[in-house]
Amino acid sequence: MAGLFGLATVPERIFRPLLRAKGVHSSWGRSLPSVNLTSSQERRGYRAATCTELKKPLILKDIAASELKPSEVRVEVHFCGVNFADILVCQGLYQEKPPLPFTPGMEFSGCVMETGLEVTSVQKGDRVIGMGGKAMAEECVVDQKLLWKIPDELSYEEAAALPASYGTAILGLRHRARTQPGETVLVTAAAGAAGLAAVDIASHVLKAQVIAAAGSDRKCALAVQKGASASINYTTSNLKDELKKVTNKKGVNVVFDAVGGDVFKNALSCLSWEGRIVVVGFAGGNIPAIPANLLLVKNIAAMGVFWGRYRDEDFPVFSESISDAIRYCQAGMIKPHIGAKFKLHQVNEAFQYILQRQSVGKVVLSMK
């Protein structure tokens, strides 16, 4: 999924061998064993899913609570989003490689437990969305600038599903592609977390006409339920031919693509005059080459969106994408789709569920 992590899911040629490797298929699907506290009673601890060895199942450990720095906030985690990037980190395949042992988890919702001496943005008891690592735990500590208050109208579960997926959709479609009302938007991998978010944002916020492309009839139906006006199953139909039929040969104005490969190539060729294609990831496994002559002849543009990079390069834009997702959800304009929910001790099962491409919408871990 894109998150602090580009949504570029790992190519099948990489994760399929991992999935088939001895012990990986079965062990990643098991519930976590629990490791009892051995520290003294006066030191409070909390449970956390911990990666102690790359490419091995996580284990549940009790962690001693750390002292807060002046700008830090301790949050009781209620829900944590599960992203493909979390799996990549635990496999050693992500660009950021934290030292072992570590707790994964990049987005979460929860309640403020304690604040550092210099914290002014939140206070104890506030309900918040947070970004940062170590969120697959009963509590986590983050800098105050990586927390956003959530209104009472939003559940903790919904809130945890917003940052990465909807942040990517908002930046990709609004900030990068400058999608306009009435334009036609094609969303590939439309039943995934980012795909459904893109369908939701494009249809209900940006007021575009959405064509959803997905790998099964069930996934296509879900995308239509989410707001797409038409859908194409690209495993049973030719995407290029179907797009011509659906658009009366006019093509589409914007493509939000997380698949790559032939799906990307067919979508690119179906862009209308001055169309834009947003590169979000390569779930299909192949990174396509872009024919520059096609960009020239049709006056079209290809652009990437690595949502998490904005945290370091342009934090106001990054922060606004989360704030706007919260605002849209509060107003009832969008509604994240929770496809599966697991308990903390089932984190390995959640990873396996995603690896086997069973997931639709967002997968979350519940700490309660």
Image (cartoon, rainbow, N blue to C red):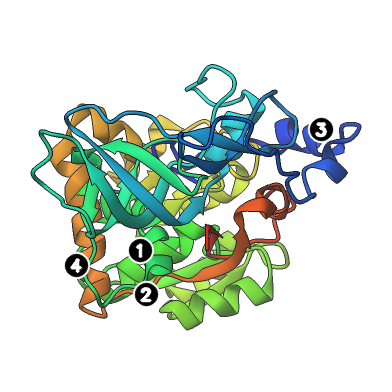
- Lower position in the chain sequence, tag 3 or tag 2: 3
Within 10 Å of disc 3 (Cα), the crowding (few <14, some 14-19, many 20+) is few
Q: Helix or strand or loop: what does disc 3 sit on?
A: helix
Please state which of the two labelled residues, at mark 1 or mark 2, is closer to the viewer.
1
Q: Which of 281 and 114 is in front in this view?
A: 114
The residues tagged by marks 1 and 2 sit, at their Cα atoms, a distance apart of 10 Å
Return the mark for residue 335.
2
Q: Report the side of 10 relative to 5 (left or right).
A: right
How far apart are labels 4 and 2 at the CA level? 11 Å
Dot 4 or dot 3: first in sequence order is 3
Q: How crowded is mark 1: few (under 14 residues within 10 Å), some or many (20 or more)?
A: many
Foreground residue, 41 or 128?
A: 41
Q: Mark 4 points at which residue?
A: 327
**Alpha carbons under labels 4 and 3: distance apart:** 41 Å
- CB contact under 8 Å: marks 4 and 2: no
Residue at left offset 43%, top offset 75%: 248
Image mark for residue 159: 1
Question: Depth check: 17 or 288 in front?
Answer: 17
| Mark 2: secondary structure | loop
Q: Do the residues labelled 1 and 3 touch (CB within 8 Å)?
A: no
Of mark 1 and mark 4, the one earlier in the sequence is 1
The reply to whether discs 4 and 3 touch (Cβ–Cβ < 8 Å) is no
Q: Which residue is drawn at 38% across and 66% down?
A: 156
Q: Does 256 appear above or below 215?
A: above
Return the residue nearer the eye: 318 or 160. Answer: 160
Residue type at mark 3?
Answer: Pro
From the image, tell me which residue sits under label 3.
Answer: 17
Kindly report which numbered mark, 1 or 3, lies closer to the viewer in this rendering: 1
Q: Horizontal and vertical percent for residue 181?
A: 20, 71
